[in-house]
Amino acid sequence: MRKGIVILASLLITIVSFGQEKNKKMTFEVDGVCDMCKVRIEKAALGVPGVKYAIWDIPTHQLSLVVDERKTNSMEIKSAIVQAGHDTKELKATQEAYESVHPCCRYRELDSNHNEKH
């Protein structure tokens, strides 16, 4: 009887630990400048199946995520973000996607015209 309980407890612990591995934290940089960018970036990330949490920090440009790696990966999330008009280090938004964002959200002009990044 004790051996059965020990085996059952071990099995339960194994199942619980495998269940926790599906949630992975990740962060990466996404270009943007304002609260409208924040909403757009977070919405794009959360629209990817498997993304459970997404917060973009305006001053640092860091997007913090919790994802189910069985359903998505960082490149799929980055692809969704560039389709919304925001660049990442690995992927750049098309000119058409970039121009679809509000004029105050156009960070590329800030980089080239003012040599400063917000």
Image (cartoon, rainbow, N blue to C red):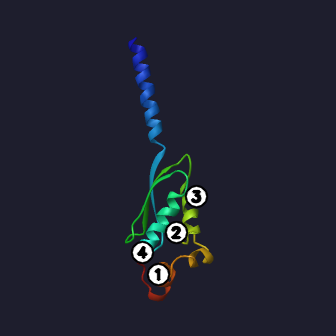
Q: Earlier in the sequence, mark 2 or mark 3?
A: 3
Count numbered badges in the picture: 4
Q: Earlier in the sequence, mark 3 or mark 4?
A: 4
Q: Secondary structure at mark 1?
A: helix
Circles 1 and 4: CB atoms closer than 8 Å = yes
Q: Amino acid at mark 4?
A: Cys
* Residue at the (43%, 36%) spot, across then down: 17
Is residue 48 rendered to the left or right of residue 19? right
Above or below 92: residue 74: above
Q: Secondary structure at mark 4?
A: loop
Mark 4, residues whose alpha carbon is within 10 Å: few (<14), some, or many (≥20)?
some
Quadrant holding the C terminus: bottom left
**Residue indicated by mark 4:** 34
The numbered mark at residue 76 is 3
Q: Amino acid at mark 2?
A: Lys
Q: Secondary structure at mark 3?
A: helix
> Residue lying furthest top in this view?
1
Q: Position of residue 22 (x, y in %)?
A: 49, 44
Question: Could you give the CA–CA distance between mark 1 and mark 2, rounded to whole angstroms?
Answer: 21 Å
* Residue at the (47%, 38%) spot, across then down: 19
The numbered mark at residue 89 is 2
Quadrant holding the N terminus: top left
